[in-house]
Amino acid sequence: MVKSLDGKTALVTGASSGIGRSTAFAFAKEGAKTIVSDIDEDGGAETVGMIREIGGECAFVKADVTKPDEVKELILQTIDMYGSLDCAFNNAGLEKELTDPTRRFEESTFQSIIDTNLKSVWLCMKYEIDQMLIQGSGTIVNSSSIAGLNGIPQQPIYVASKHAVAGLTKANAIAYAKQGIRINAVCPGLIATPLMDRIWTSNPEWKAEANNFQPIGRPGQPEEIADAVIWLCSDKASFVVGHMLTIDGGFTAG
Ligand SMILES: NC(=O)c1ccc[n+]([C@@H]2O[C@H](COP(=O)([O-])OP(=O)(O)OC[C@H]3O[C@@H](n4cnc5c(N)ncnc54)[C@H](O)[C@@H]3O)[C@@H](O)[C@H]2O)c1
């Protein structure tokens, strides 16, 4: 059976957990040779195991996306192993603020959220676009958030990082659209992943409200974001450029 991404190579950062893991799995299921990348080797091995179990082709490459040399090497290894880079999901991210207000945080917290959520996306695109320009084609999806569109008062640095991802996505989408590279972003709502589990553990009152947070009446599942990323990377989304795709159970409709 022909699959929608047969013959393509996909790269997913932050693929050892949550949304990244589900998306790496979905890429492989659609026939893409998939690079599973993360700083977490054990989680990466689990993702690789899940993909191989369904007969998918994949490899783990350890890379800290905040480090320029490691990102450069990640893209080089992808090309070395699979010969091209057709689809990239720049997904690795973290949340450290929880409910404390801005004034309680140290500069180091600001820097670490900005480096992991924003600088990483810029670094990944820098090297991904180099390769996609050589090929004359490619699709990139960045991980923003409903926090990249709306203000969430408890998470100002996270919100700032995700708004900035929106800016990077739109500017680069316009810059490279004529050269065969389509760049978009996903804006997930509240999705049940280990990241949310950490937030819920330290803020049980948020967990109690989780079903009411979005009009649909439940948190999203990582697979529901993965499906949207696969669509954005497929030819079915051939005219979609610079779009911030909300997948949020209706949160931003309000
Ligand atoms: N879960 C949600 O509700 C939600 C909502 C909107 C946006 N997002 C975004 O989706 C993305 C994935 O989130 P998730 O919920 O799956 O989180 P998660 O914590 O389950 O997974 C994040 C992964 O990123 C990896 N990672 C962190 N720092 C890294 C680094 N420096 N280099 C390489 N890998 C690194 C972690 O090891 C982990 O495997 C994040 O960018 C997050 O901000 C999540």
Image: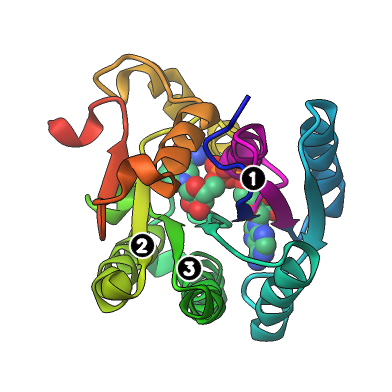
Which three-letter amino acid code belongs to the residue tagged 3? Phe
Which residue, as the protein is rendered here, is positioned at the far bottom?
69
Q: Secondary structure at mark 2?
A: strand
Q: What is the CA distance from the residue labelled 1 to the residue labelled 3?
A: 41 Å
Helix or strand or loop: what does disc 1 sit on? loop
- Residue 68 in percent (x, y) is at 64, 84
Residue marked by disc 1: 32
| Location of residue 60 in the rendering, given as x and y in whole percent from the top left corner | 81, 55
Q: Could you say whether the residue bearing mark 3 is in a helix, strand or loop?
A: loop
Q: Amino acid at mark 1?
A: Ala
Describe residue 203's horizontal placement relative to residue 83 as left or right: left
Q: Is residue 58 visible?
A: yes
Q: Is residue 8 above or below residue 211?
A: below
Distance from the alpha carbon under mark 2 to that under mark 1: 18 Å
In front of the other: 4 or 173 = 4
- If you read the primary sequence from the N terminus, does the residue marked by circle 3 or circle 2 appear first? 3
Q: Is residue 146 left or right of residue 118?
A: left
Disc 2: which residue: 183
Give the spatial CA distance, label 3 vs label 2. 33 Å
Give the residue at x 56% y 67%.
116
Amino acid of disc 2: Ile
In terms of depth relative to the viewer, which is nearer, 158 or 75?
75
**Dot 3 corresponds to which residue?**
105
Query: Residue 250, percent across and down?
Result: 23, 27
N-terminal of the two: label 1 or label 3? 1
Residues shaded magenta:
13-37
In this picture, is 131 found above or below 209? below
